[in-house]
Image (cartoon, rainbow, N blue to C red):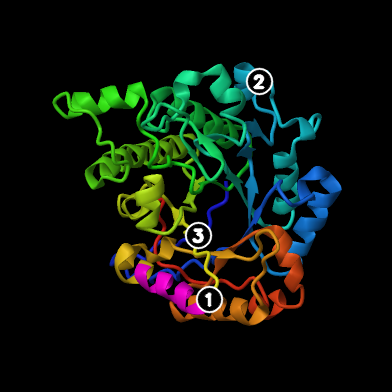
C-alpha cells in the first residue's frame, strides 16, 4: 500500500555533523465518494475508466468507492458467499467493480478507499433483508422489540460480537486481497441508532455491568447513550488494530455525522476515536445549506472537538449533490475558501455525479495536484 496524506515531523539528530533531512511532501486529500445509487459509473468498466480519467483531469487524488451496501458487496466475497450464497450484488455478476476502480485509479496515481457504506445497517426498507432473515439474533431492537429502524434503514446490533466479527471479516477480506489504500466507515460504521440497543443480548450485557439493572426506557438518556457509544468506540479500536495488523500502511478513515449529534443519534463519539488514535483520517459530513452554518461547524471542530495536534487528520465532507440539490457555485466557492482560511487544504465531496455539474470550476481550485505539507504521520 502507498503511504498517503500525513507527514512525519522531522527529527533532528545531532551526530557526526549530520545535516537535517527535508520534510517529505504529500498531497492533501482531494476526494470524492463514488456510489452505485443515482450513478451509472460502476455499471461498466468503460464507465469507471471515464470517471477516473475525468477526476484525474480535475485534480482529484482520492476515490471513496462503495464496497458494501443493501446486504451485498461490490466485489466477489467469499464471506458473503458462505453466509448468504450471494458472493456479489447481482448487478455485477462476472465482474469485480472494486478491482476495476483500483486498476483505473492506480494507473493515474489516485488513491482508492473501500467504503463500507451500510456498515451495521442490514437493509433499506426490506425489514432486515437477507442478513436478519438468516440471523434474527443479529438484529438491533428498539424498546418495543421491533427491528431498530431510522430513516428507512434497518439495523444489526453493533454491540453483538457475531455482528462485529462479520463486519471485521468483510473489511479484512478487502484489505488482505485488494491493493486498496484505505478503508472507510461513515455514519453507519461503527454506529447504531440510539433507538436500538434493547435486544436481549444488550439488556443482559447492560445488566451484568449495572448490578442487574435494565437499560432506561428513554433511548437518549445520557448515561445510556454513553455506555453504548463506548462499546462502539471499543469496536473502532479493534477495527483499527485488525486493519493495521493486516496492512500497516492501510489508511483507516471515518466519515461520521457532525458531533455531538452523531453521538446522540448514532452513538458515534468520533472525537474520542481521533483522540485515542483509532483513525488516520476523519471526514465529518458537514452537509449544510448556507455558509454561516458551515463556518460554525468548522469553528466547533477546530476549536474544541479536535485537539490542535489532531487537526491534520481532519478534512470536511462537503455536500455537492443529493436528489435534485446542488449548491450554487458561489456557495461552493465560499465553503472551499473557508476551508483554506481554517488551514484545511482539501475536502471530500458527496458525490461523483455532482462533480460533473461544475466542470469548469475544479481546475480553478485544484490547478495542480500540489504537494501540501502536513504535520504528523499517524502510522508512526
Q: Residues within 10 Å of mark 1 (few under 14, many from 20)?
A: few
Q: Residues within 10 Å of mark 2 (few under 14, many from 20)?
A: few
Q: Position of residue 358 (x, y in %)?
A: 73, 73
Relative to 136, is 313 above or below?
A: below
Give the image quarter of residue 308: bottom left
Q: Mark 3 — residue?
A: 285
* Residue 81 in magenta stretch: no
Q: Secondary structure at mark 2?
A: helix
Q: Nearer the viewer, residue 12 or 331?
A: 331
Q: Going from the N terminus, do you reach mark 3 or mark 2 first?
A: 2
- Judge from the rendering whether residue 108 lies leftward or rightward of residue 16; answer left or right: right
- Judge from the rendering whether residue 272 lies leftward or rightward of residue 79; answer left or right: left
Residue 332 seen in the current view: yes
Mark closer to the observer (2, 1): 1
Which residue is painted at 52% across and 68% down in the image?
A: 288
Q: Mark 2 — residue?
A: 81
Measured in 3D between alpha carbons, the distance from the residue under mark 1 to the one under mark 3, in whole angstroms, is 14 Å
Q: Secondary structure at mark 1?
A: loop
Q: Are marks 2 and 1 in contact (CB under 8 Å)?
A: no
Which label number is shown at residue 275? none
Q: Residues within 10 Å of mark 3 (few under 14, many from 20)?
A: many
Q: Going from the N terminus, do you reach mark 2 or mark 1 first?
A: 2
Residue 380 seen in the current view: no
Q: Nearer the viewer, residue 211 or 337?
A: 211
Q: Secondary structure at mark 3?
A: loop
Which residue is painted at 72% across and 32% down in the image?
A: 89
Residues shaded magenta: 291-300
Which residue is painted at 49% across and 50% down in the image?
A: 253
Relative to 356, is 125 above or below?
A: above
Q: Mark 1 — residue?
A: 290
Q: Position of residue 71 (x, y in %)?
A: 62, 31
Give the image quarter of residue 363: bottom right
Amino acid at each position: 500500500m502507498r503511504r498517503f496524506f500525513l507527514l512525519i515531523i522531522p527529527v533532528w539528530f545531532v551526530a557526526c555533523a549530520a545535516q537535517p533531512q527535508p520534510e517529505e511532501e504529500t498531497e492533501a486529500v482531494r476526494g470524492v465518494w463514488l456510489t452505485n445509487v443515482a450513478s451509472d459509473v460502476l455499471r461498466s468498466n468503460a464507465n469507471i475508466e471515464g470517471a477516473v480519467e475525468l477526476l484525474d483531469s480535475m485534480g482529484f487524488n482520492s476515490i471513496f468507492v462503495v464496497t458494501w451496501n443493501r446486504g451485498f458487496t461490490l466485489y466477489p466475497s467469499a464471506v458473503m458467499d458462505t453466509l448468504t450464497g450471494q458472493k456479489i450484488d447481482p448487478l455485477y455478476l462476472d465482474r469485480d467493480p472494486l478491482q476495476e476502480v483500483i486498476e483505473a485509479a492506480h494507473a493515474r496515481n489516485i488513491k482508492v478507499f473501500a467504503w463500507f457504506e451500510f456498515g451495521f445497517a442490514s437493509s433499506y426498507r426490506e425489514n432486515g433483508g437477507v442478513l436478519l432473515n438468516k440471523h434474527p439474533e443479529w438484529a438491533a431492537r428498539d424498546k418495543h422489540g421491533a427491528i431498530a429502524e431510522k430513516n428507512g434503514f434497518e439495523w444489526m446490533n453493533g454491540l453483538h460480537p457475531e455482528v462485529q466479527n462479520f463486519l471485521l471479516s468483510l473489511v479484512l477480506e478487502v484489505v488482505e486481497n485488494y491493493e486498496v489504500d484505505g478503508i472507510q466507515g461513515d455514519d453507519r460504521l461503527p454506529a447504531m441508532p440510539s433507538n436500538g440497543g434493547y435486544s436481549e443480548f444488550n439488556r443482559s450485557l447492560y445488566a451484568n455491568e449495572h448490578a442487574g439493572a435494565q437499560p432506561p426506557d428513554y433511548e437518549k438518556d445520557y448515561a445510556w447513550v454513553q455506555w453504548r457509544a463506548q462499546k462502539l468506540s471499543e469496536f473502532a479500536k479493534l477495527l483499527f488494530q485488525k486493519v493495521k495488523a493486516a496492512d500497516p500502511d492501510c489508511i483507516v478513515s471515518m466519515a461520521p455525522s457532525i458531533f455531538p449529534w452523531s453521538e446522540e443519534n448514532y452513538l458515534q463519539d468520533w472525537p474520542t476515536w481521533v483522540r485515542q488514535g483509532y483513525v488516520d483520517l476523519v471526514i465529518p459530513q458537514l452537509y449544510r445549506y448556507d455558509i454561516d452554518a458551515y463556518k460554525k461547524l468548522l469553528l466547533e471542530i477546530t476549536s474544541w472537538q479536535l485537539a490542535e495536534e489532531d487537526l491534520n487528520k481532519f478534512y470536511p465532507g462537503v455536500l455537492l449533490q443529493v436528489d435534485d440539490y446542488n449548491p450554487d457555485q458561489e456557495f461552493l466557492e465560499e465553503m472551499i475558501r473557508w476551508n483554506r482560511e481554517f488551514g484545511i487544504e482539501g475536502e471530500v465531496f458527496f458525490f461523483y455525479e455532482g462533480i460533473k455539474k461544475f466542470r469548469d470550476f475544479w481546475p480553478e481550485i485544484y490547478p495542480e495536484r500540489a504537494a501540501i505539507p502536513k504535520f504528523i504521520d499517524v502510522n508512526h
